[in-house]
Each structure stands twice: as C-alpha cells, then as structure tokens.
Amino acid sequence: MTSDLLSDTRMNITFIRPPYFIISGFIGLPNIKYYYFFLFFVYFVSVLGNVAVMAVICLDHNLRTPKYVAVFNLAFVDLLGSCALVPKVLDIFLFNHYYVPYNDCLTFLFFCYTCLSMQALNLVALCYDRLMAIMFPLHYHVKVTHKIMFSMITFFWLFVITCVLLAVGLLTRLSFCKSLVINSYFCDYGQLYRLACNDYFPNSVVGNLLPVLFLWLPFLFIVSSYICIGCVLAKVTAAHERAKTFKTCTAHLLLVVIFFLPIIITFTMSLRIHPNARIINLSLTSVFPPMLNPIIYVLQTQEIKVSLKKILKIRRKSRITGK
C-alpha cells in the first residue's frame, strides 16, 4: 500500500517537457493557401514601407525631432514584428512544418508578444506628443524633448521585455502531459498554458494581466487624451484653426483605430465566433497595422512627404549629373 502511494506521488510530480508543439492553424478551410500568399504580399509591403520610413528619418536631419524618434521606433517595431511572425507562419503552413520545437515555440511567443505590446505603447508615446503639442503649445519643446522621448521608449522596451519574459518563464514550470496541439496560428500564450496538466493559475493571472497592461490601459490613455484634446479644440473659435490643429492628429488617430479596434472586437466576440474566424481576425490584426502604418504616415504627414520628395529629387539629379 505504501509503495503504491509513493509511486503515485512520483507520477504526480513527474515533469514533462515535450520536444515540440503542433500548431493546428485553420481547420477545414478550402483554398487556405491563397490566404498565406496574401500574407506574404502584406509582409513584403510591410518590410518595404517600414524600411523606407526608417531610411527617410535617418537621411533627413529635419526629421530628427522627438516625435520622429517615436515614429522611427514604431517602424522598427513593425518591421521586427512582421519578420518575427509572418515568415514563421508561412514556414509552418505553406511547407507543413506544423511541429514547432519547444524552445522555438517559446522564442516565437516572446517576439510576437513583445512586438505587439510595443506597438500599443508606441502609440501611447505618439499620443503624448500630440497631447503636449495641442494642450501646451508654448511649452511643447520643454515637455517633449529627445531625452524625454528616449527615456519613455526605453522604459516601454524594458517594461515589455520584463513582463513577457516573466510570462515565458512561468511557462517553463508547466508540465505538458495532455494534447500538444495549439489551436492558433502561432504559439499563443493562452492556448499554450491551458495544455498543461499541473497548476497553471499563475499563468492564468499573467495571461489576464497582459491584455490589461498592453491593450486596455494604453487604449484608455489614448481615448482620455483625445477627450482632453477635443475639449481644448472646442474652445478655439476659428473653425479653420480647429481643422488645422486636428489634422495634425489624423495620422495617429488612424493608427489607433487600425491597431486597437480589430483586436478589441476580436477579444470581446471571441466566444461567439468560429475558431477559424477568430484565428483569421487575430492574424490580420497582427499583420495589417505594420503594413498600413508607414503608408498612413507617408500620406498623412506633410514633413515625411516633403522629405521623401526631397530625397527622390536629389537622387534623380545625381543620376542625371552622373550620366
């Protein structure tokens, strides 16, 4: 009897770390490979667009302002996030590499969550810039300096990396003796810890805390900021002055809508929609903002348009003189 109890206890504390996880992706969808080719197109445009924005900011000394430090960081995060997610997704589903090694899965998760969280916090940094510019125009250059912007972005990076490393570290204490199939298009944190057969309560707490820290709080800060901006603009008597001031916020507002709205809708409706629809929505919200962000900034921001035209003009002249 005693030996049976000891053997049961040993079985209960056996730690199982699987060699791999299986990414299930989309189940039963016809012609799904066309969607992956579409993802490749989005990825290609994202890389070109974000590299172009980063290059323009580096080449034009006029764009080396605190605001464009945040824009450069957003382009870098979008580029890093696209490169971390899309090639791996295409490798998994186009080339049938559904078996993702354990360590690779945790690394995949780390980069995806880090970049997604940094996108949200970078929009907070850009919102801070617009808030100070409109509410305190006379003190803008005091309240928004290179030092403040660099400090803010550095803090965001350190905070995000610490939180995501904590989440990944908590996964390493889990024992996986159930199914190894992850019902997502990447190593999704929530799907992953629910596969464990030991206590995953700390993971559940962190899993619920991460969306609050990196989705809801940034979104509430941005909404509150624009309410304050709206109150300030309401006091401006001249309609053309209101329109001119508000126009400086249009690029940022578009980025906020494109990033936050699809994620919030997907999270709030996740229990009522088909798993395939949830995966498609989440994958699109992961790849579309990095593609659209540089396009929006090029089309909506006068400084970048002027800088881009200037760079293209100089290159055209150098080619003509070279001939």
Image (cartoon, rainbow, N blue to C red):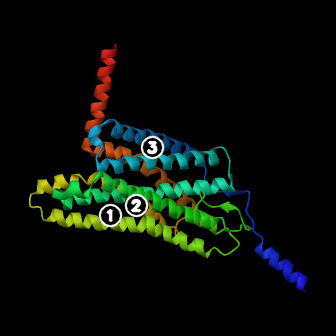
Q: Is residue 109 visible?
A: yes
Distance, label 3 to label 1, CA atoms, is: 25 Å
Residue at 59 percent of width and 71 percent of height: 203
Instruction: Using the image, tell me which numbered label, if any, was put on residue 222.
Output: 1
The amino acid on which the numbered mark 2 sits, given as a three-letter code, is Phe
N-term-proximal mark, 3 vs 2:
3
Residue at 51 percent of width and 62 percent of height: 162
Distance, label 2 to label 1, CA atoms, is: 11 Å
Give the side of residue 68 with respect to residue 134, left or right.
Answer: right
Q: Residues within 10 Å of mark 2 (few under 14, many from 20)?
A: some
Instruction: Using the image, tell me which numbered label, if any, was put on residue 133.
Output: none
Q: Nearer the viewer, residue 22 or 145?
A: 145
Q: Nearer the viewer, residue 128 or 100?
A: 128
Contact check, label 3 and label 2, Cβ < 8 Å:
no
Q: Is residue 26 visible?
A: no
- Which image quarter holds the N terminus? bottom right
